[in-house]
Amino acid sequence: MQTLWFWLTSIMVAIYATLDGFDFGAGILHPFVAKTDSERRQILAAIGPYWDGNEVWLLAGGGAMFVAFPKVLAAGFSGLYLAIFLVIWTLILRGIAIEFRSHVALDLWRTFWDGIFFLASSLMPIFLGAALGNIVRGVPLDKHGQFNLPLFTQFAAHNPVGILDWYTVLVGLFVFVTIAAHGALFLSWKTDGEVRSRCRRLTLPLWSASIGLGVAATWATAQVNPDIYVNLPKAPLAWVGLVLFVVGIFVVFFAQPKERDLLAFIGSSVFIVGILAATAGAVFPVMLRSTLDSAWSLTAFNASASREGLTAGAKWWFLGIPLVVGYFFIVFRLHRGKAKAAADGEGY
Amino acid sequence: MTDALFWHRLQFGFTASYHYLFPQLTMGLALLIVVLKTIAARKRSELLNRAAGFWIRIFGLSFAVGVVTGIPMEFQFGTNWARFSEQTGEVIGQSLGMEGMFAFFLESSFLSILLWGEKRFGPRMHLFAAWALFVGSWASGYFIIVTNAFMQHPVGHSVDASGAIHLQSLLTYLCNPWALVQYAHNMIGAVVTGAFVMTAVGAYYLLRGQFLTEAKVFVTTGVIAGLLASLLVAFPTGDQQGKMIARHQPVSLAAMEGRWNSGRYAEVDFIGQPDVLRQKLDNPLQMPGVLSFIAYGSFSSNVRGLNEFPADQWPTSIELLYYSFHIMVGLGTIFIAIMLLAAFLLYKRRLFELRSYLWLLMLAFPFPFIANTAGWMTAELGRQPWLVYGLSRTEQGYSQLVHAGETVFTSLGFAGLYLVLGLLYVSLILREIEHGPSAALKSASPQRT
């Protein structure tokens, strides 16, 4: 049951990264690929129907962790206290930017919110990447399963560590570039005209940068947490993740030049899911690694809810997930085709 | 500044109260929008559909702020109340997780269709989206109330030797009798807010002589819904809520009424000031026997006073609890009076011309927000000193490793951010009201050139 919940939680996080990733990516790219008000609104029209639903995966993933691994949620959120609040405030500003921007027909107002939208969309993947970096590197969990980290110390990836150090910032940058590349493929699929051709010009350079940073992050991971590569051969699901991740890259580089936009976007989604699945498989069953003593790490087995709690949660989870898939299918189906910029008062 | 617990409580109380200003409006409006749109579809009324369209725009802005101010609430369980989350996550995580799965996904999927999709997807899909938002937001309300009800009156759980709380029966947990009563009371409270706001905007247009046909729809709908909701929020739901507190939290009832000594024929007090130091109520205006009757159904019932309970089980802020409760009840009574008279004037066909009463209706809209906030303060302050009533004390629940200074910093951050957010929201709402109900069809609006 614990193993099942470990994977349910991981899957929800991976879906979140893929879905909210494309609208973060759109936010990162929009000042560069959309110059006029109408082009910016084309981008907002492309993500407008989805962004809120995408973000719910974060809350739902958090909810799953709350039910199944309350100790991990409690330790992680309180330990990364300041970083979590930066994430919260960034999400608040970003949501407001999307929803409020087009309500007022003043250039300065719109430029201001475009700037907030760009900044918040850029910071989010960096924060999430840094969070992933913290999970992989480990945090100073004590024997009570608690810790509290400052935002940064001297940026060395050994104790006393901070939330941001060279390793977690490197992972953050990797995620930032990958998400931008992912967003470029989404926008190529959902937009047309100038915006689409600008996105297409950016796609391969972004992907090349992402792969370069990915190689660097892989090397760096071996420096801060060599256990991962020791575990890897024994973790079959991590291999599935690795295969997905390699297949994803090939699909992107195959489909993008042939203008098979949807296929390329799916490839990039597979790539992101694969990389997270490989990480989850390699760290399993550890969910929060202690840098002080490996016996103090929080794992899917020592930090989980009781059997009754996990079983009850699994019941509603499997009842709910077909509904959620249904909603997403309806929304994507209704908004099929290229996104069109809305006129004032008629859309994002 | 070293008192971390104080700052954790203040921060959660502030962010929760601020957040709930928006959902109470959107949940109330969701019901009114669904009613207007369903009638419009049945009668093929362009007017009612246009009226609903205006409220959908107000709903959209309010919903957006509700969403973004709701995000911190989910995180704050883990960041600020880590020990509590660890101890109870297995139980309250169920309803918080279900809220995401069964409410948030439904709402978020159909929100943009409701806001922008009427032309593109047609009236039937649009009506469906309105229903989806109504069902989603009201379901969301239930999951939050279930979570709170567990904290007020825990059921469906077991406690192990280490003090950790486990889930025993999901069904018992979800059907907590406290939740059913509190949900009815709370949701009708939200309808009061929605109805007063709709009435106020209608009254404003009537006073200005603008959008008269739509304004009459707003006032009529608002007054009918407002009267029904004001009555129902007091009786039976408020009454049942009071009886629930009398049965399960008698010490809170004593504090809510500023009652130190036990006795039969207990008096209900309308006004008064609790003096905690001297343990008495100053300058009370009371009616004997009524509290006994309200709480236990008989004028001669004994209602226990605070002195009958150990002082470490008294609510931690008796004064605030007392005033919150009395503000809620007092305002609730005034709402019934305002709406009864408004309904009477409406029935006599005099309301639309009676400018003084329109002024009153226009200016009354902030008070349901105050009453709902005071109601929640009554519930939450009355629960103290417990996080989970009788099981887990508040001072044991916060994140001990988080420095008090960090919490001060993030509290100040919220104060600043929410001030800006509030100003932006109000200015956009005022713009929407200026544009009026026909703003969607810009060329058709003579007010704007």
Image (cartoon, grey):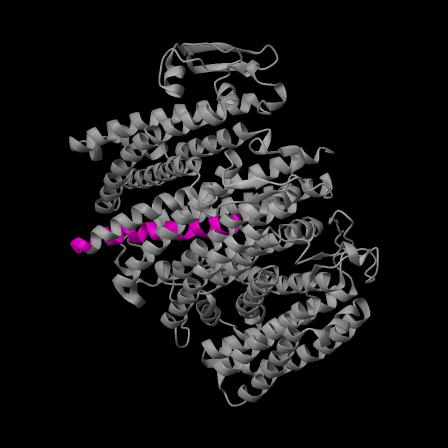
Could you say where residue B16 lies in the image, as x and y percent from the top left?
53, 41
Could you say where residue A90 lies in the image, as x and y percent from the top left?
60, 56
Residue at the spot x=76%, y=73% of the render?
A229
Residue at the spot x=21%, y=46% of the render?
B213
Q: Can residue A93 be seen in this view?
A: no
Q: Is residue A336 left or right of residue A11?
A: left
Q: Is residue B9 left or right of residue B168?
A: right
Q: Is residue B375 magenta?
A: no
User: Closest to the observer: B52 or A62?
Assistant: A62
What residue range appears in magenta? Answer: B42-70
Does residue A292 lie above or below A277 as drawn? above
Does residue A208 lie above or below B130 as drawn? below
User: Closest to the observer: A245 or B344?
Assistant: A245
Among the 4 quarters of the image, the one containing residue A242: bottom right
User: Closest to the observer: B241 or B447?
Assistant: B241
Among the 4 quarters of the image, the one containing residue A199: bottom right
Q: Is residue B65 magenta?
A: yes
Quadrant of the image containing the N terminus of chain A: bottom right
The count of marks equals 0
Residue at the spot x=75%, y=49% of the render?
A147
Residue at the spot x=47%, y=48% of the render?
B66
Quadrant of the image containing the C terminus of chain A: bottom left
User: Closest to the observer: B329 or A47?
Assistant: B329
